[in-house]
Image (cartoon, grey):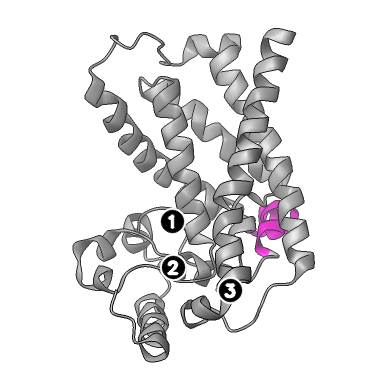
Amino acid sequence: MHQVFDPFIKIFSTSAIRYFLVAGIPFVLCYVWLNEWFDASKIQNKAASRHDFRREILHSLQSTIVFAAAACLVLYSPVKNITRVYTSPHAYPAWWLYVSVVISLIIHDTYFYWTHRLLHHPKLFRHAHLLHHRSTNPSPWTSYSFHIFEACVESLVLLLITVILPMNVISISLFVFIAFMINVYGHLGYEIAPKWLRKTILFEFTNTSVHHNLHHSKFTGNYGLYFRFWDRLMGTEHPNYVEEYDRVQQNRINKKGATI
């Protein structure tokens, strides 16, 4: 029993620390210390409450327990036998470690888009996904604020990815860390993307904080996690997204004379 329980405690502790650091640092900067400086970048005028933050943190810790359990199943239980997780550093070329992370993010985005749309089915939404949408004005703490059923659905992506792709602990850790950082940015409540992004090809296929913030405020559309691909292909991108993004960026320029 301890062969799984001990790693679970280690993974949960590490994940909880990561949550409080990766979500907490931008929260403190944007919402506390430099809130006046970031005010021009705020997406919604209204402010979330401390009650919202407490609820989000509690449910995020619950989700972290689920994610840690899923990682233990994949890495330390007999389930590992059906995955392609490898331990030898020489099993694959060094470049594959990074390529596998990129591919895993693409797989995750596809998985997230379709499961996210499924969770918006009226019955599932009411009983599960509504909890996440209680954060109509999201903050970094919202990132893992899921109903336990949704957390279980989200956790299955790790099994899917490791069944499809050869990955080791380093690439899995990179995938989880990068995914969470992007998740925090999507729920930040502020648009911090540089001004020059708007005129690049990156803007055409990557999501922004405004993109996901619209999903929280409108409750529909913009189902993607990292990329705009599926939303644009399936016609589910909010029609006012680009206009809203430009409004927020122009507000930054008007208030701060931003040149970034």
Q: Quadrant of the N terminus?
A: top right
How far apart, in angstroms, are the residues tagged by discs 1 and 2? Answer: 9 Å
Q: Tell me, yes or no, whether the highlighted magenta stretch contains residue 132.
A: yes
Q: CA distance from mark 2 to mark 3?
A: 10 Å
Residue placed farthest to the front in the image?
A: 33
Q: Nearer the viewer, residue 66 or 174?
A: 174
Task: Give the mark, 3 or 1, whose residue is nearer the N terminus.
Answer: 3
Residue 84, placed above or below residue 190: above
Q: Residue at x 58, y 35 (%)?
A: 155
Q: Give coordinates of residue 203: x percent, y percent.
A: 28, 65
Q: Are marks 2 and 3 in contact (CB under 8 Å)?
A: no
Of tags 1 and 2, which is closer to the observer? Answer: 2
* Res. 224 mark: 1
Q: Residue at x 54, y 17 (%)?
A: 75
Q: Using the image, determine if residue 117 lies above or below residue 157.
A: below
Answer whether labels 1 and 2 touch (C-beta < 8 Å). yes
- Name the residue beneath numbered marker 2: 211
153 left or right of 199 in image: right
**Residue type marked 2:** His
Name the residue beneath numbered marker 3.
Answer: 217
The picture places residue 39, in percent across and down from the top left corner, at 53, 80
Disc 1 is placed on an element classified as loop
